[in-house]
Amino acid sequence: MRNVRTVTVLTHRRPADTQPALETLFDLAREAGIQLRFDAEETAKHDLPDDPVVASDAPLDRAVDLCFALGGDGTILGALRAYAGSGVPVFAINFGEMGFLATVDREDAWAGSVRALAGDFEVMSLPAIELSMASESWLAINDVSIQRQQGKRVADLEYSVGGDEVGRVRCDGLVVSTAAGSTGYNLANGGPVMAWGVPGMVVSFIAPHSFTSRPLVVAPGDRVSVHNRSREEPVDVIIDGRPVGVLMAGDRLHARLLIDQALLAQVPGTTFYQRLRKKFGRLATPL
């Protein structure tokens, strides 16, 4: 059990969807004397009550006890990135489509909020991918994708691991994902699903023009480098579904795994395999 006294609240872009859950959260926070913090963006998004337990226009504080994320996987990933390395767990209520990372679904918002504010949850530590390109760097919880730009020719991408070239393929792109992200873009590419807790990254091509290209699971201590071998075509660099930059023709970027970066709250007893079956169904249908 954790002692929860201050909570950051982050929500997705449709405030009407999350309003009933927020009102429940306000009531529970008043009863428990817990402060709910909303940054400037969240304050502008919601009609917040004039209440001592609500701190509006509050800067993001990485020393809070808990972060509430009300939304889909994009909102949850944003919360995990915001609190990566801080030791602050993210308790997520799914208001999106898949919500694979969510702690509870929206129909369990009340019970989940009670549990969260009481500190009655377990935490799972998630790794992240540190991406570096030129003088810039970013952190990804799920994946990094390098994709050809709309209307441009197919990409010509080469990747190496620890200095050794592994593959060069004309394709629509390439994805480097963590175990947590292996059920996303990587899965759509035919890559393997990695159970949470499995160290390492998986590299998979998007629509490769090849009969032989295969996904590869990379050891956790190895660095993946991607080289845009196109003579003139740039490619987009996307982190957790958010465009962050462009890899110009001839340039490289590098990705490495950082262990124990983010904390995801879980209902006690929840396993990855339960989550996998609930969100994706049975892996095979019995005859």
Image (spheres, rainbow, N blue to C red):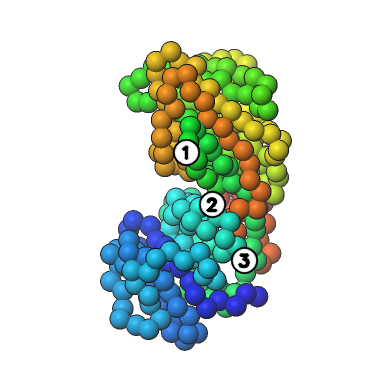
Left or right, 72 with reference to 208: left
Residue drawn at (28%, 64%) of the image: 44
> Which is more foreground, mark 2 or mark 1?
1
Image point (68%, 28%), residue name: 162
* Horizontal side, residue 237 vs residue 85: left or right: left
Q: Can residue 20 be seen from the camera position used here? A: no
Disc 2 element: loop
Question: Which amino acid does the dot numbered 2 rest on?
Answer: Phe
Which residue is outermost to the front? Answer: 135
Which residue, given by chain and number where applicable, does mark 2 sit on?
A: 100
Mark 1 lies on a secondary structure that is strand
Looking at the rendering, in which quadrant would you find the N terminus? bottom right
> On the image, numbered disc 1 is attached to which residue?
136
- Label 3–label 2 contact, CB within 8 A: no
Judging by the rendered image, the residue that carries numbered circle 3 is: 267
Can residue 238 be seen in this snapshot? yes
- How packed mark 2 is, by other alpha carbons closer than 10 Å (few <14, some 14-19, many 20 or more), is many
Separation (CA) of disc 3 from disc 2: 14 Å
Expressed as whole percent of the image width and height from the top left, the position of residue 120 reads 62, 74
* Mark 1 neighbour class, 10 Å CA radius: few under 14, some 14 to 19, many 20 or more: few
Picture quadrant where residue 247 is located:
top left
Side (left or right) of 48 relative to 61? left
Cα distance in 3D space between marks 1 and 3 = 37 Å
| Count of numbered badges drawn on the protein | 3
Residue, x 63% and y 24% (percent of image)? 160
Mark 1 and mark 3 lie on one chain; the one further toward the N terminus is 1
Judge by depth and name the residue closer to the eye, 99 or 262: 262
- Amino acid carrying label 3: it is Val
